[in-house]
């Protein structure tokens, strides 16, 4: 089952990028897609996915210790890889990387990097 939490998506868009909401929404979809692909590769039994941007959660059974950790961080890793493939993060100042209101030359790369960092931190809290 796949559920979409609109409130979580809106809060995620506000956290990641208010100026480019379409890129933030795409980053959320890339995150969930990375988790779905990882669950399929690890042959986990997918019970449900709740897509809520950086607050997304999943209930997957039949995964062991290391596979659970890899599954939890597969979404942020997917966002980070997309950010590196898109390029352009090197040419953005640190203040603009953190600022969700900033005008960006390469918004796809920066927003996926922001999304990866916030999603990683929330995933780390979820594991603990």
Image: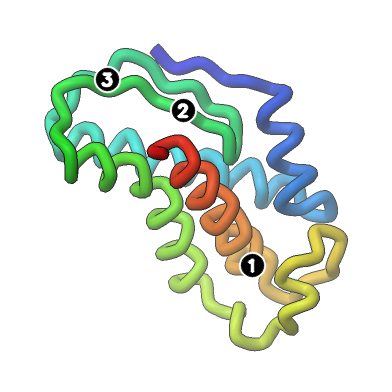
Label 3 neighbour load within 10 Å: few <14, some 14-19, many 20+: some
Query: Disc number at residue 110?
Result: 1
| Placement of the C terminus among the 4 image quadrants | top left
Q: CA distance from mark 1 to mark 2?
A: 23 Å
Question: Would you place residue 107 above or below residue 121 in this image?
Answer: below
Q: Residue 71 appears in which quarter of the rendering?
A: top left
Q: Is residue 24 found left or right of 126 in the rendered image? A: right
| Placement of the N terminus among the 4 image quadrants | top left
Q: Earlier in the sequence, mark 1 or mark 3?
A: 3
Foreground mark, 3 or 2, reads 2
Q: CA distance from mark 3 to mark 2?
A: 12 Å
Q: CA distance from mark 1 to mark 3?
A: 30 Å
Q: Position of residue 107 (x, y in %)?
A: 69, 65
Tag 2 secondary structure = strand
Q: Residue 12 appears in which quarter of the rendering?
A: top right
Q: Position of residue 24 (x, y in %)?
A: 66, 48
Label 2 neighbour load within 10 Å: few <14, some 14-19, many 20+: some
Q: Which residue is mark 3?
A: 46
User: How is the model colour-coded?
Assistant: rainbow
Q: Position of residue 111 (x, y in %)?
A: 64, 60
Question: Would you place residue 65 above or below residue 27 in this image?
Answer: above
Which residue lies at the image location 27% right of the left edge and 20% below the top edge?
46
Question: Would you place residue 81 above or below residue 30 in this image?
Answer: below
Which residue lies at the image location 57% right of the left edge and 63% below the top edge?
113
Tag 3 secondary structure = strand
Which residue lies at the image location 53% right of the left edge and 27% below the top edge?
51
Tag 1 secondary structure = helix
Q: Which residue is mark 2?
A: 57
Please give the count of numbered marks on the rendered protein. Answer: 3
């Amino acid at each position: 089952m796949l559920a979409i939490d609109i409130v979580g998506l809106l809060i995620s868009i506000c956290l990641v990028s208010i100026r480019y909401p379409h890129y933030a929404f795409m980053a959320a979809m890339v995150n969930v897609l990375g988790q779905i692909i990882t669950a399929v590769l690890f042959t986990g039994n997918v019970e449900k996915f709740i897509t809520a941007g950086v607050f997304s959660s999943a209930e997957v059974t039949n995964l062991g210790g290391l596979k659970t950790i890899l599954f939890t961080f597969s979404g942020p890793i997917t966002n980070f890889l997309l950010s590196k493939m898109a390029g352009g993060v090197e040419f953005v100042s640190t203040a603009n990387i953190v600022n969700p209101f900033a005008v960006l030359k390469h918004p796809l790369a920066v927003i996926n990097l922001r999304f990866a960092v916030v999603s990683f931190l929330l995933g780390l809290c979820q594991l603990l």
